[in-house]
Image: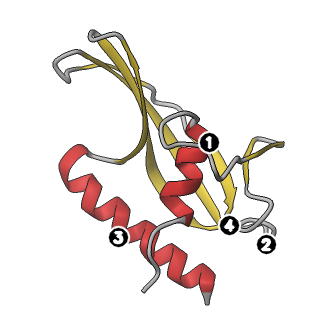
């Protein structure tokens, strides 16, 4: 049941954020006032591996200081996310433990985990 609820949350988040920006941005790193790089969710759903909760596709875009897209990566960067302890983000075959106590914005893996796993489920 948790997987179904989490999938619905992901779809709702993606739909609401997609209307504004074309994808659900979960992390942005700024480089001075002239550049930023944003990571977003292009796709997502229940994980195929039962040890994880979600499988997602991450996009990468670079923007100038006024928000104009300078570069949009066309690759499909797949990741899996486990919400329960130990929280993990898997990229390819590498598992990265997520510090769930980290402040938002300090680590993209934490922000991906938080976007998927800390949304209200009511």
Q: Which residue lies at the image location 61% right of the left edge and 84% below the top edge? A: 2
Give me the C-alpha separation between circle 4 and circle 3: 17 Å
Please tell me whether residue 73 is drawn above or below residue 111 in the rendered image. Answer: above
Q: Which residue lies at the image location 53% right of the left edge and 56% below the top edge? A: 114
Residue at label 4?
Answer: 47
- Foreground mark, 4 or 3, reads 3
Give me the C-alpha separation between circle 2 and circle 1: 20 Å
* Residue 69 visible within the image: yes
Image marks 2 and 1: residues in contact by CB distance under 8 Å:
no
Give me the C-alpha separation between circle 1 and circle 4: 17 Å
Front one among 27 and 48 = 27
- Label 2 packing within 10 angstroms: few (<14), some (14-19), many (20+): few
| First-in-chain label (2 vs 3) | 3
- Image location (x, y in percent) of residue 52: 74, 65
- How many marks are shown on the rendered structure? 4
Displayed quadrant of residue 16: bottom left
Please tell me whether residue 68 is drawn above or below residue 10 in the rendered image. Answer: above
Label ID, residue 109: 1
Residue at label 2?
Answer: 50
Displayed quadrant of residue 1: bottom right
Displayed quadrant of residue 17: bottom left
Q: Which residue lies at the image location 27% right of the left edge and 11% below the top edge? A: 33
| First-in-chain label (1 vs 4) | 4
Give me the C-alpha separation between circle 4 and circle 2: 7 Å
């Amino acid at each position: 049941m948790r997987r179904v609820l989490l999938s619905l949350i992901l779809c709702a988040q993606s739909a609401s954020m997609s209307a504004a920006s074309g994808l659900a941005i979960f992390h942005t790193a700024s480089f001075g006032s002239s550049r930023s790089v944003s990571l977003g969710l292009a796709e997502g759903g229940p994980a195929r591996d039962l040890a994880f909760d979600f499988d997602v596709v991450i996009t990468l875009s670079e923007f100038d200081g006024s928000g104009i897209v300078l570069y949009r990566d066309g690759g499909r960067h797949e990741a899996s996310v486990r919400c329960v302890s130990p929280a993990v983000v898997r990229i390819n075959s590498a598992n990265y433990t997520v510090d769930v106590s980290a402040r938002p914005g300090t680590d993209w893996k934490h922000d991906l985990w938080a976007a998927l796993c800390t949304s209200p489920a009511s």
